[in-house]
Image (cartoon, grey):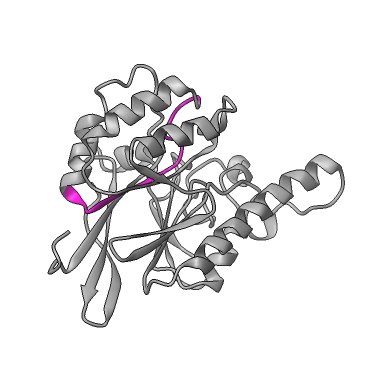
Amino acid sequence: MPADKTTIRFAAVGDLHCTKDSAGALRGFFSQACAAADALLLCGDLTDYGTLEEARLLADELSVVSVPIVAVLGNHDYESGLQDEVRQVLIQAGAKVLDGEAVEVLGVGIAGVKGFAGGFGRGSLGPWGEGPIKQFVNEAIQEALKLESALAKLRTQQRIAVLHYSPIAGTVEGEPMDIYPFLGSSRLEDPLVRYPVSWVVHGHAHRGAPEGKTVNGVPVYNVAKPLLQRLYPHRPGFRVLEVVRKAEGLVSRQASSVG
């Protein structure tokens, strides 16, 4: 990135659902994202069944990307129980795959975690009753703690959170209400309130809303590729968000473009 560049652009997308038949289908898409942005954020469900074949194919498609890549995995990437292997394939392809870690890219701090389900607000599932219920809720709690730990490590003026599951109900609106509890958890919102964050991106909710806000006003963007393609059929299915470089630091700004 040129030293005098004033605007840093991030192309964000989730839910690529790369299959064994996706060979060649994503290269043009990734090339467009590179042309539009200085870094690429991948918000989980990068593969369809979490197989090594899919991961390797995706890695090959990513070979055209010439900008930094930061990713988190999604529930589909866990389907075959090979999430660690999938992560390593993507790391070898040049991506920084976060699971409760933090990284600095182009002067911007990025915290990433998959997240988990459990519901929102008064509809959140509580850790009471049978053991499996407590285990389910504990998984959401642990994911929230990982996000908090990652955010706490960042010392940059601007911070971005990259998730797969949603931290708010606002960006899952449009999905059947019956499945809201499986699309995210308010527990993921708590660290975003405690630590300053410029904006948040996530995927998972294919028929949700494209944007919302946390209780303290932090913008949250649902960048699931199926959602963006449905809402904006004549544009590439990624969202561009900006951070503006100023003498006193970096100031976040949403780009007006989607794709």
Vertically, is 200 above or below 117? below
In this orientation, which residue lies closer to the viewer: 37 or 241?
A: 37
Image: magenta residue range: 36-49
Residue 76 in view, yes or no: no
Q: How many marks?
A: 0
Q: Is residue 222 left or right of residue 84?
A: left
Seen as rendered, the residue at the extreme bottom is 248
Q: Where residue 110 sits in the image (x, y, percent)?
A: 41, 59
Question: Would you identify the image quadrant in which residue 47 lies?
Answer: top left
Q: Is residue 2 left or right of residue 122?
A: left
Q: Is residue 121 left or right of residue 250?
A: right
Vertically, is 244 above or below 51? below
Q: Where residue 105 sits in the image (x, y, percent)?
A: 32, 59
The structure residue drawn at horizontal position 50% and vertical position 39%, both measured from the top left corner, is: 74
Vertically, is 214 above or below 65? below
Question: Would you identify the image quadrant in which residue 33 lies?
Answer: top left
Q: Where residue 26 sits in the image (x, y, percent)?
A: 27, 30
In this orientation, which residue lies closer to the viewer: 72 or 154?
A: 154
